[in-house]
Image (cartoon, rainbow, N blue to C red):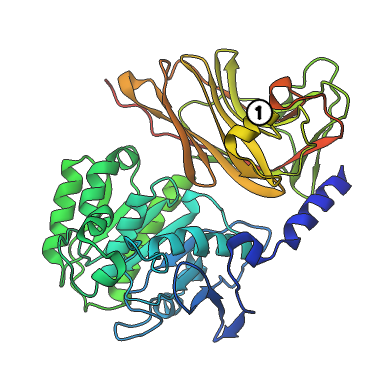
Amino acid sequence: MKSVLINSLALLAALSATEVWGASPAGAVIEDGVTVYRVETPYQNGVQEIRVLLPDGYRADEPHRVLYVLPVEKGFEQRYGYGLDVLRQMDAHNRYGLIIVQMGFEKEPWFGDHATDPNTRQASYLKEFVVPFIENQYATIGAPEGRLLFGFSKSGWGAFSLILTYPEFFGFAAAWDAPMSLDEFRHRMEAVYGTLEQLDAYRPDLLAARQKRHFQDQTRLVLTGQKDWEAHTAGMHALLDELQIRHVYDDSLNVTHRWDADWMAPTLEALMGLAQEDETRRIRWEFRDLDDWRDDSQGESPRSYSIVDGVLCISTRRQTRDRVKVRTAERFGAGTYTWHLYAPAMGPGDQASIGAFLYRDDRHEVDFEIGYGKAALRRELNASETDLVCYCTCQGHPYSSSQMLVRRDAWHTVSIDIRRGEDYNYLITWLVNGKRAKQLQTTFGDEVTFTIHCSMENLTFMGDHIPTQDNHALFDYVEFAAAPPAEDH
């Protein structure tokens, strides 16, 4: 089993940044204790910098939160100060154990994608390139709760715009003295958005109404201010209250409109308070042992699973119907379930499936299943030889199944988010690498709780023939974040 893990991790390590992101980062340099990467990507013209400040006690075997400091000027101009450096002077990276990242932009940053210019995609640059780049380079939590956004003025707009646009990707955001409801171009916005219709797609005030359900159960936003954009701050606070969006609000920070510890310290403290409160809702299994897990293998399947270097490895044998599974000893209800798993190349046509799923009984089961897939389905999905098929399935009440493609020989973060929806029944969302894959309103609710499962099974629906090779899956961690208790209804 150990050789399986070593071979899989070696293959992952061999992937260059160009293969992963279609970009060509130059070698990093250290400047005054800050690591500087220079990258060229399809999201912007020219070479841009990403600067990283690590906590003094940084360890590569411990996951860290990442604070993304959003700039207010293009490049690293400093007419309004230098956010990352002020945070370093505050010792924020050590006080909170943070990886702090500031990135540069070719154009004035407004954190949207241009309506027509593919080389001006600032929102996509941050989400699709910067975050994966950082999470590949460093030990991070690698999930929404570990991705924090921080800014003021136009970058405060950016912090709210980004989390409201991608509420299932970013976890928390803080903004001080920021515009929130601009309905016409100002301060070189047109170069970033292109059209007023595109501006509307990224306006925080309009997004709040559309995305409110993501922010009504848990406090994820910090809104502070009182300076140049006082009316916008107060207006956004009133709107959030009207929409019943939970948030922290403080309009007493009357400070010079620039990066300044006098507003940054209390705003960051509030942001970290939310992140740390969220941590108390979470249980994370990093597979140092299986004390909280039980064998759930079926029939005469071998217990072919073990832990190697903190990774759970599960395998099945060729020419068998092995169904090898482990499950939690306890059951859990509404909340977010996350698995970080490695999907290797599966035998072509093999009826073998990696499972990350929740189970109560055969009609109350919510699944991710990943495998090679039947030839007819692969043709329908236009799969390439580097693709696997991922099933997102609810087994009943109602039954629903959808399929999508994921890369083989890659780590994936898959999540099942269960919230209370219509009539307080479960609203289930499947997410793959931070992107929503499927959503389903069910007809059952808190009366149903689940055990959490990790599996490797030779299942007939996943291919065209009995497996001709041994297959395996790797699980780096599993996590459960409980939803807030249901209110009386």
Q: Position of residue 69 (x, y in %)?
A: 41, 69
Give the secondary structure at mark 1: helix
Q: Quadrant of residue 56?
A: bottom right
Question: Which quadrant holds the N terminus?
Answer: top right
Q: Residue at x 56, y 70 (%)?
A: 55
Q: Position of residue 367 (x, y in %)?
A: 58, 27
Left or right: where does residue 122 sit relative to residue 231? right
Q: Nearer the viewer, residue 165 or 263?
A: 165
The residue indicated by pointer 1 is: 376
Q: Residue at x 46, y 14 (%)?
A: 397
Question: Is the residue 45 above or below the residue 172 in the image?
Answer: below
Q: Residue at x 45, y 73 (%)?
A: 103
Left or right: where does residue 232 sit relative to residue 27? left
* Badge 1: residue crowd in 10 Å (few <14, some 14–19, many ≥20): few
Furthest toward the left, the residue is 231
Question: Is the residue 161 above or below the residue 27 in the image?
Answer: above
Whether residue 286 is visible, yes or no, is no
Q: Position of residue 84 (x, y in %)?
A: 43, 76
Q: Amino acid at mark 1?
A: Ala
Question: Is the residue 194 above or below the residue 163 in the image?
Answer: below
